[in-house]
Image: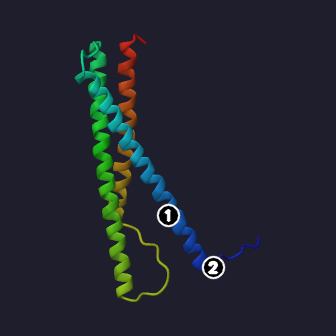
Amino acid sequence: MNEEKIPLTESLGMFNTYSVEVRSKIDALVRQVLFLSGGVQAITIGAFLNGTPPQFPSEAISLLKNGWLLLSASIVFSLLFMLGQVFAMIAVGLKFSAKLRNSRAGAEIMNAPMPLRVFNWVVGLSAFLACAGGVVALSKAAMSLIGA
């Protein structure tokens, strides 16, 4: 099988484009999690602070409380994830700076330290799962209000 060799500069450009795409998808997802968690929480809490709050069965109240806690956790996890991403970018920047200071030639893939990458994965996935769990819990609470 005859494989064409792609020049290194072109490969690096393609990898950089891919990295920017992935970063933009991650940023968009984090914004959606924050928007959804904050919005749903504000709407549902607002329903209880304005006028007469709806009367929920006791199991629905538990779902409502758990949903709010999960949405709050999702917001905190999202913020921690964004902070972790900043630390990761700083770590990569320091590696890149050292490479330039030492005049090391050649292409390198520079990653953040493994513990920081694991932290970001765990916290990012936790934010997503907490948001999804909170929305489901609030949906079930709302369904119990109408007897579904």
Indicate the amino acid at tag 2: Pro
Kindly report the distance in space between the C-alpha atoms of the residues bearing marks 1 and 2.
18 Å
- Is residue 104 positioned above or below 64 on the image? below
The tag on residue 7 is: 2
Point out the tag, 1 or 2, that comes first from the N-terminus. 2
On the rendered image, what quadrant is the N terminus found in?
A: bottom right
Q: How many marks?
A: 2
User: From the viewer's perspective, is residue 62 above or below residue 84?
Assistant: above
- Left or right of 5: which side holds 130? left
Label 2: how many Cα within 10 Å (few below 14, some 14–19, many 20+) = few
Looking at the picture, tell me which residue is in the foreground, 40 or 100: 40
In percent of the image, x 31 and y 18: which residue is there?
60
Q: In this image, 107 relative to 93: left or right?
A: right
Q: How many other residues sit within 10 Å of disc 1, few (<14), some (14-19) or many (≥20)?
A: few
Residue at image coords 29%, 57%: 83
* Extreme residue in the top direction: 147
Look at the numbered discs 1 and 2 and tell me whether their residues touch, using CB distance below 8 Å.
no
Q: Is residue 104 above or below residue 17?
A: below
Res 40 → quadrant: top left
Q: Which residue is mark 1?
A: 19
Residue farthest along the bottom direction in this orientation: 103
Q: Residue furthest front?
A: 51
The kind of residue on which mark 1 rests is Ser
The answer to which quarter of the image holds residue 57 is top left
Nearer to the camera, 53 or 135: 53
Q: Quadrant of residue 141?
A: top left
Name the image quarter holding the C terminus: top left
